[in-house]
Image: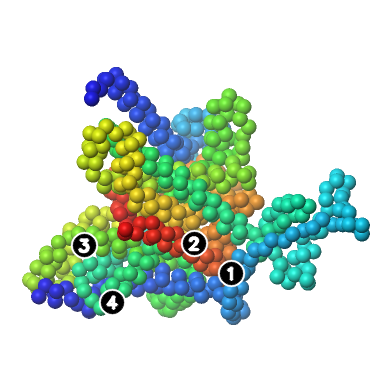
Amino acid sequence: MASKLTLSNRAGWTFVLPGFALISAFIVLPFFFAIGLSSTNQRLLSPNPTQFVGLENYQQLLGLAVVTLEPERDDAGEMLRNEAGEIQYPRLREITRSEAYPQYRGMREWFRWQSGENVMIVIASDVVFMKALVNTFLFVLVVAPVQGSLALMLALLINHKVRGINLFRTIYFMPVVVSIVVVSLLWRFIYDGQNGLLNSILQALTFGLFQPVDWLGNPSTALPAVMAMSIWQAVGFHMVIWLAGLQTISPTLYEAAAIEGASRWQTFRYVTWPGLRNTAVLVLVVITMQGFALFAQIDVMTNGGPLDSTQTLVFQAVERGYGKQDISGGSTISVILFAIVLAISLIQRWLTRER
Amino acid sequence: MAVNPDNYGLRLFVRYLVLCLIALIFIFPLVFMINSSFKPDSQLLADTSSLRAFLPVGDISLNNYFGAFRRAPVGLFVLNSVLVTGVTVLLSLLICSLAAFSFAFLRWKGRDVLLSIVIATLIIPFETIAIPLLLLVSKLPWIGLDGLHWGWLNSYRVQIIPWVADGLTIFLFVQYFKGLPGELIEASRVEGASWWQVYYRLVMPLSGPVLATAAILKFLVMYNQYLWPLIVVQQESYRPVMVGLGYFFQLNVAWGEVMAYLTLITVPVLVFYLLLQRAFIASIASTGVKG
């Protein structure tokens, strides 16, 4: 009797239909669209018909090779040197433009290093994409552990029942509700090279010894500056997730630990941390997902510069797909990004599997 | 265990000191923003090298606010954002709760498959579908008062409709509904209530907490929208607040006006947050229960 009451194909489908249709049209369809578009040369507005190009877009992005340059020698086999005594090497373009190496055609130098007499050069079809890929991974690899652990420390600090603790929790969480666009703009003042707040504070602390740094204008400090701001903005978000995790740990475990005479570190190590295992995986996965989606900070603060030192995957996908109207190129980057995110989700599944 | 009262007092003092210092780190850019919005540009830039940056001192006025309104259609941008955010939140609550109601309480062919698809979309970040979605909406048809036309770019609908339904909102509702007593629903069915009546008269009145959570999360996402309106709305008349910011960065940048604009679009959200901070924090915490 009871089971018949809830059995209704017509009502079931009717209630679900609006929501499911919207999700299908605006999430699922574009997702498969992205995969399809990545094998074409589609542009946003184009007079030419769209053509199927297979994996060409992926080759254009992912093409990598290492070439070895040997020193130039004279007829006697002696290495040629210039006036400063430096060994002379043939120019890279003699290889990338040579008929003898069609596989390297159009590739450009990414970075090089010296190996004995020879020079090794990593060449890439799309150096900017490679930089974006590396920067995005660097961002995630730094932000995930740092933000995650700072958030845990804040959660432990705030988890004490002292008067007024709610006020502090409210303040720590505040940057989360402020738009990342607003936050990024404000931090441009903090990072400014001349009168920036950060430079002013550092100079005051070192009694004027500190030399001002143009944090966002310097290729070696721009990405770390974006990382620091991103950590600041969302650390309160993860603090709240940690707090939710902390509250699931039974107080009796802490009582037992106190009776056993456990130190604070032992209590954390053997009671708190094991109880937070799933929360830890969740926090890391959420930070990772947010990290791979890095866009607004870059768009507002650096535009990918200086010297491509803050290029990211999403920034590149948007710059190509929207800025250059190269829908297929942008979609290809999107698919690669999704493949990375999917791999991380699968790792999460595996880490939190039932044992 | 004997507690030394002096030691206890000292430790409490240190604890509060640490808490306050950390609070300063989180609050100082916002204090800087609000104070700067009252200062003329020359003073604003000079003040950043001292503590004056955080104090409302010197030549204080509302001139920047008047300037911001003269420079850009600020009221229009705010109206656009409020409209898009409000409509999306309301539609989302209705459509996602209906779908979740069906997933949680009814049994029908295909339910499990559809629910799995909805859950699977949780791992698709919006950023990975933005570009193909741009192509899709640029070709969609729309029937308006002036007949059929193609392409959704530069409109309210392109900012609203794709954001109405999402996996997380449906999932939050399903989780909540599963915690409600199923016997109640069956009992009202026995009494002859239609499914719509069960949804409207019985389940919705019990769903205050999850409605608040879903509304707050959607509100934050919608009001702070940036990437999507940036690529689909070029016309000024449909621009939301975050994209409208671009207005202040053409030609010469008047920083005081920028600060006034940032304050105008941020402070209402902050006030809203401070009033409902428990609900805000609870809604973020509840997303952590997923997975």
Q: Nearer the viewer, residue B204 or A94?
A: A94
Q: Are marks 3 and 2 on the same chain?
A: no
Q: Are marks 2 and 1 on the same chain?
A: yes
Marks 2 and 1, the one that precedes in the sequence? 1
Left or right: residue B240 compared with residue B275 = right
Give the image quarter of residue A76. Answer: bottom right
Residue located at (46% from left, 39% from top): B29
**Distance from the alpha carbon under mark 4 to that under mark 1:** 36 Å
**Distance from the alpha carbon under mark 2 to that under mark 1:** 15 Å
Task: Decide: few, some or many residues near mark 1? Use Cα within 10 Å; few <14, some 14-19, many ≥20.
Answer: some
Give the image quarter of residue A159. Answer: top left
**Distance from the alpha carbon under mark 3 to that under mark 2:** 33 Å
Residue marked by disc 2: A340
Residue marked by disc 3: B178
Tag nearer the camera, 3 or 2 = 2
Q: Is residue B244 visible?
A: no
Quadrant in which the C terminus of chain A is drawn: bottom left
Instruction: Provide residue A63's location: percent of width, then percent of height.
Output: 64, 66
Residue located at (44% from left, 36% from top): B25
